[in-house]
Image: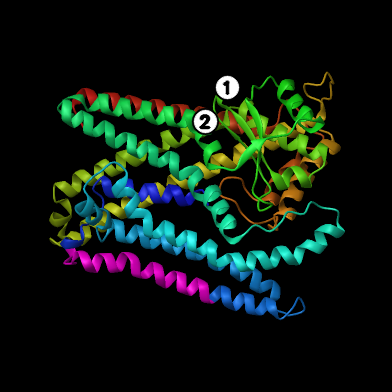
Amino acid sequence: MLLHPIVLIGVLLMADGGFGLAGERLGLTPGTTTIIAVGPVLLVLAVVAAGLAWCRHRLAAGPAAPTGPQAVLLAERLTRYGRWALLAHFAVVVLFLGWLDLVRGAVGDRVLIDELLTIAPVVTGIVVTWWLHYPLERRLRDALLVRRLDLGQAVFPTPSRGRFVLTQLRMHLLFLLVPMLLIVGAAEVIDAAVGRWGDPRQVGWAGDAATVAAAAAIVVLAPLLARLLLEVEPVPEGSLRDDLERVCRTHDVKVRRLLVWRTHGSMINAAVMGLFGRLRYVLFTDALLESMSRRQLEAVMAHEIAHIRRHHLPWLLLALLAAAVPILSVLAFVQTRLQRGVWSQAGFGENPLWAGLAGAAAAAAVAATVIVIFGWISRRFERQADAFAVRHLNGAGHGQTDETISPEAVATVSGALEAIATLSSVAPDRPSWRHGSIAWRRAYLDSIVGRAAGSLDIDRQVMWIKGLVAAMLGLGLAAAVMGWGLGVG
């Protein structure tokens, strides 16, 4: 779901950079564009609602119904595909029908106002998919209640429909969308200031530097914002918090606070937020703390500490920045060719649709490549964090001198991953863009049993990744400096 905010902001930035068409260039009136922008959203929601109603009907036949389990899977796929259909429609109306331009023509280019109104239909549609899915979610929770009691597992009260939707909105959209919108808003303010106080062609570098500084400040302060967006509270005092804080001290990691993330039992996960100790938090969902053993929780904590000790978060940000260099280069190249009418000279005619298609296709192709690369790097960081947790349980930092990875340490971390999959009702082989499948991660852990703890291949692989990212970033910055010096851009 974290891809959804990225897609929303990415499409807006592409349209703002001139890649797309205005509706009037295709002969569309503002009213027609508005109907096309809103109508398909209602159609997608109608299809999802009908599909979920059928799934509930099949489940009502009882657990013996042969299509019952398939109905549950179908419901999950329907809502997921429905959200992606909404995002695809959003990209079409913004890039090819000039939806952003139409909104700006009505309200003006006001800071964040036009962007918020532009994304309002798709965001509303996504929220409605959660609203539609709630009856099925409630039915599944009620069905699992007795089973969880029999197994001695924690039981969470089923949230109301409004609470369920709000929790999903916080977790899957606002958590990332709000900081990204703040960065976009800061860039708009800086661009306006540069345009008012100087010639952008002469002081454009100052605006770029100020935008980067503002974005960096928002990223640094994002953990404080996340505390407002998410429903969190400190982990209560007691032996559990003492054990988790001991892991921090063992690896000399500073954390401002350990937090419980109240998801009402809807998520089994942990996360670390913040680049610096005074602004760094480690989050554990309520279901995770209630469902895992102390040893497994220690493994989860060590995994999160690994992200800090190995500097995964800043390196992911640097990787994203380094990956943005080819995006900007390709888009600038395509935009220059469009401005010079190369597509007309190549025989595509004067139809602006060809230019819009060419620009959007180039941007989408490069952006997709970067998303794939970013996900690949993130999955290797997760694998390294798993190995770090194994080393921690193996005795590293506790005064022991184990030289090889023990089966017990691997079994604990692997068991924690299995528990996350089981409690989340996620198939072990289900792929994950940022984390990789549980089966993939467990298979690697099994392969390091008996290996030397200080020389794992994942550490060498990550070292090469960081070196490549640093090289790409250095080349990109050098190219940018040369471009400013030559007056390009």
Query: Which residues make up the magenta segment?
Result: 26-50
Q: Position of residue 360 (x, y in %)?
A: 30, 54
Mark 2 touching mark 1, by CB under 8 A?
Answer: no
> Up-down: is 85 above or below 108?
below
Q: Position of residue 61 (x, y in %)?
A: 71, 81
**Dominant secondary structure, magenta:** helix
CA separation in Å, label 2 and label 1: 19 Å
Q: Residue at x 42, y 28 (%)?
A: 216
Question: What SS does tag 1 mark?
Answer: helix
Three-letter amino acid code at disc 1? Arg
Q: Circle 1 is placed at which residue position? A: 278
Residue 24 inside the magenta-drawn segment: no
Q: Residue at x 32, y 44 (%)?
A: 112
Screen quadrant of the C terminus? top left
Residue 378 is drawn in which quadrant?
A: top right
Question: What SS does tag 2 mark?
Answer: helix
Residue 396 is drawn in which quadrant?
A: top right
Disc 2 crowd rating (10 Å Cα; few below 14, some 14-19, many 20+) is some
Q: Position of residue 301 (x, y in %)?
A: 71, 34
Q: Position of residue 156 (x, y in %)?
A: 73, 54
Q: Circle 2 is placed at which residue position? A: 315
Check residue 288 in the rendering and tell me which mark sits there, or answer none: none
Three-letter amino acid code at disc 2? Trp
Residue 40 inside the magenta-drawn segment: yes
Q: Nearer the viewer, mark 2 or mark 1?
A: 1
Residue 205 is drawn in which quadrant?
A: top left
Q: Is residue 5 left or right of residue 298?
A: left
Q: Can residue 80 be seen by looking at this rendering?
A: no
Q: Is residue 169 left or right of residue 340?
A: right
As rendered, which of 96 and 291 lies closer to the eye? Answer: 291
